[in-house]
Amino acid sequence: MAVLGRRLGRETNGQSSTAEEAPTTDCVLLGCHGGAGTSTLAALLGTQWDLGSYESETLRIETFGRPLLLVTRDSAPASARAVEAVTGVSGSGTTVAGLVVVADGSGPEPREATVRLRLVEDRVERVVRFPFVAGLRYADIADAGRVGLPKKAERALAEIRRLCGTVDSPESDTKEQEKRI
């Protein structure tokens, strides 16, 4: 399998396996705003439950028992939309399992974004920061799983899967087999 970063002539040193080999994660994703990275994250996690973007008119979100993850970029304007979405969703009685903050570049998170995101930490079960991955900017959504991800991005995906109850380890295979018996 070709790694997209290599095909484009980009270095992939320090990168681990592709997300295509990862298990399907049963969770619901909702972007706090357009362009949050929700569709790409859905492709990387293998979930089909991408609800698009939050709108303030949304009164209720039904997840049918699946964990709800809100997704936002780490810019100052995006963090303002994240505060609005977390407030609206949690105010409607829906539990927010996590807020995934997707880096929009290789630089540091703006201070304004960090401060705003701290305001909602107590209203979500966990905040997970997903790092900037240059190779994802060159891939279509259908090819996102073929992009070689840096270890930091793999760790963020693993943390999201744990949050959603999907653990991709040999131990989880044993637990699944025990459940069937």
Image: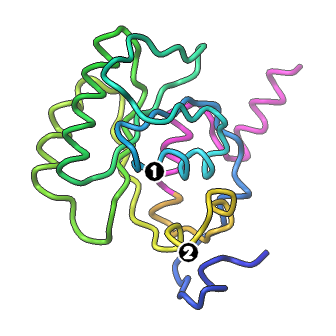
Quarter of the figure with the C terminus: top right
What crowding class fits label 2: few (fewer than 14 Cα within 10 Å), some (14-19), or many (20 or more)? some
Q: Which residue is mark 1?
A: 37
Q: Residues within 10 Å of mark 1 (few under 14, many from 20)?
A: many
Nearer to the camera, 65 or 42: 42
Is residue 85 shown above or below 156? above
Across and down, in percent, residue 131 comes to 39, 61
Direction front: furthest residue: 57
Front disc: 1 or 2: 1
Q: Which residue is the site of mark 2?
A: 15
SS for dot 2: strand
- Image location (x, y in percent) of residue 121: 24, 32
Q: Secondary structure at mark 1?
A: loop
Quadrant of res 122: top left
Asked if residue 75 lies in the magenta stretch, the reply is: no
Q: Which residues are magenta?
A: 155-181
Residue at x-position 10% and y-position 50%: 112
Mark 1 or mark 2, which has the lower sequence index?
Answer: 2
